[in-house]
């Protein structure tokens, strides 16, 4: 993982909520709010990216593990949905569905299922002490 990764989110227009997200000056994505919050829903919301971070980390972790251990995984799909109804009370529920493809034994499937829960983002979301310091530029 990059120790000094840089993410810059910047306004595209004075009106609206669509913003450009630059990651390490190499990747460009966009974010917006859903219509229900005054946005245009033209791009994923921050919550969408949060959920996507978990799904993509699980996918890449399982794929890498399978490759390193000669497990015949030919494909993986991770679906994440969330329940944010109690977010203001500090509860955010993520439901993850893992789909593994390939000629895998039950033992290999169980192992890869366990590996998915060991991905770094899952660990961050469930057990890390995260410190955020915000300063004015």
Image (spheres, helix red, strand yellow):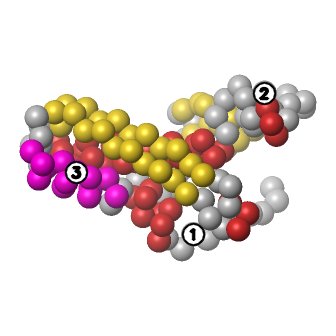
Q: Which residue is mark 3?
A: 112
Q: Which residue is mark 2?
A: 40
Q: Residues within 10 Å of mark 3 (few under 14, many from 20)?
A: many
Give residue 36's mark: none
Disc 3 secondary structure class: helix
Residue 15 appears in the picture as rendered: yes
Please provide percent x and percent y for residue 65. 21, 49
Q: Residues within 10 Å of mark 1 (few under 14, many from 20)?
A: few
Q: Is residue 79 left or right of residue 109?
A: right
Q: Residue at x 51, y 53 (%)?
A: 94
In the foreground, 15 or 5: 15
Q: Name the main secondary structure of what is drawn in magenta.
A: helix
Q: Which residue is outermost to the bottom? A: 129
Q: Read off the magenta span.
A: 105-117
Badge 3 or badge 1: first in the primary sequence: 3
Q: Quadrant of residue 117?
A: bottom left
Residue 137 magenta: no
Q: Is residue 118 left or right of residue 82?
A: left
Q: Residues within 10 Å of mark 2 (few under 14, many from 20)?
A: some
């Amino acid at each position: 993982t990059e120790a000094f990764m840089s993410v810059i989110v910047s306004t595209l227009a004075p009106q609206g909520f669509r913003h450009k997200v630059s990651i390490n000056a190499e990747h460009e994505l966009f974010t917006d709010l859903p219509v229900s919050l005054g946005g245009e829903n033209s791009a994923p919301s921050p919550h969408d990216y949060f959920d996507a971070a978990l799904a993509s980390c699980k996918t890449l972790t399982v794929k890498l593990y399978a490759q390193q251990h000669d497990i015949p995984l030919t494909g993986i799909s991770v679906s994440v949905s969330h329940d944010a109804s109690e977010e203001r009370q500090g509860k955010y529920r993520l439901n993850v569905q893992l789909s593994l493809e390939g000629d895998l034994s039950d033992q290999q499937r169980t192992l890869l299922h366990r590996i998915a829960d060991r991905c770094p983002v899952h660990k961050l979301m469930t057990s890390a002490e995260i410190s955020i310091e915000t300063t004015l530029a």
